[in-house]
Amino acid sequence: MIGPKQSKSGFSNCETLFDFDGKQTKVAQIEKRMSAPDFWGNQEAARPVVAELKSLKAVLKPLEELGKASEDLATMIEMAEEDESFASEVPGEVERLEKLLADLAIKALLNGPLDGNGAILSINARDGGTDANDWAEMLLRMYINWAQANDYEVELLDRQENEEAGIASAAIAIRGPMAYGYLKGESGMHRLVRISPFNAEGKRQTSFAAVDVSPEVNDNVEIEIRDEDLEEQAIRSSGPGGQHVNKTSSAIRLRHIPSGIVVHCQAERSQHKNRATAMKMLRARLARIEEEKREAEQAAKYEKMPKTGFGSQIRNYFLHPDQRVKDARTGHLVGSFHSVLDGNIQGFLDAFLRWRVEQN
């Protein structure tokens, strides 16, 4: 059982681990900055500041709750020693305190320099024909559901439909406290095994979709992209067909020659806006490469990171012969396929954060 001295000590350790005082000071500075009359005049500049404030409060709030819970538990134990009627309340309070500590333990693992940023998540159908296109769209829905359940903002950056069903690819921005820190472990190949709804003979089909997650970075982060290193192509936007087809060449494809990274955006009718979004996506991908290099230097981790190629799937999703979803890295298993596709993936995200620490 957690006693008064232990709970106080645990809270003190958490304050030190999370730099409680430093974060409180930073929050006060940001809130003062946000109160300036001209702050909201530039929405683009205001967005990363607001995001930073949310990320700081996402840590401070549970820390404050933990402090109060520690005090309440200490008081409850003292009262229970004098009056046994209070003793029955102690186990429930201990359980609540332990849950707060467990949540903070996960947040402690989100210590990368870009973990507090928003995430740009892209999904591409791979092997499996139409089933793979359908699978890519199912994954897109899964991540949107997870984001909405956590009160994150979701913006569709790009979506390329497949003529028969599903999507060829899509990219979304997910903005909220620690979005990139939680989601970066989702990069890799996701494999689905099911009875194909597109096969008249009802045969089992294996499909693959590649997920890529990069940190969303603002213009204050220095990432050099030289004009001579870019190949730009304006193409016609694809659509659902018929009268809704955008017949102007507003879609933009950018290729970064040194890295080989290719990004595509057709979300807007304006070529200028699509180019700006494509550049944002490219900056995010390059920022992730720089972070991987940093992690490699610190912990020789780069070689251990999952690659997005056939046969290197990070997670397997089964609808046949039974329903289950299992992570190939952490071993985390969920017996309800539909629950996972409805966005209940937090267990996988937390398990990856713990597994990553164990690998170093």
Image (spheres, helix red, strand yellow):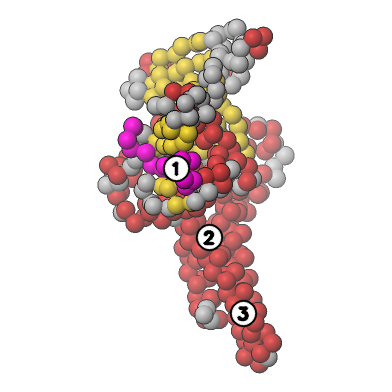
| Residue 283 visible here | no
Check the image and report above or below for 169 versus 105. above
Classify residue 20 by image quadrant: bottom right
Secondary structure beneath disc 1? loop
- The quarter of the picture where the C terminus appears is bottom left
Q: Are marks 2 and 1 in contact (CB under 8 Å)?
A: no
Work out how far the residue at label 2 is from the one at label 1, CA to CA, in angstroms: 35 Å
Pinpoint residue 272: horizontal percent, then vertical percent.
Answer: 57, 16
For the point 62% across and 39% down, the residue is 153
- Please tell me how many numbered marks the rendered image carries: 3
Residue bearing mark 1 = 321
Q: Single out the mark in the foreground, 3 or 2.
A: 3
* Magenta-colored stretch includes residue 315: yes
Horizontal relation, residue 243 to residue 314: left or right: right
Q: Single out the mark in the foreground, 2 or 1.
A: 1
Residue bearing mark 3 = 90
Magenta range: 309-324
Classify residue 308 by image quadrant: top left
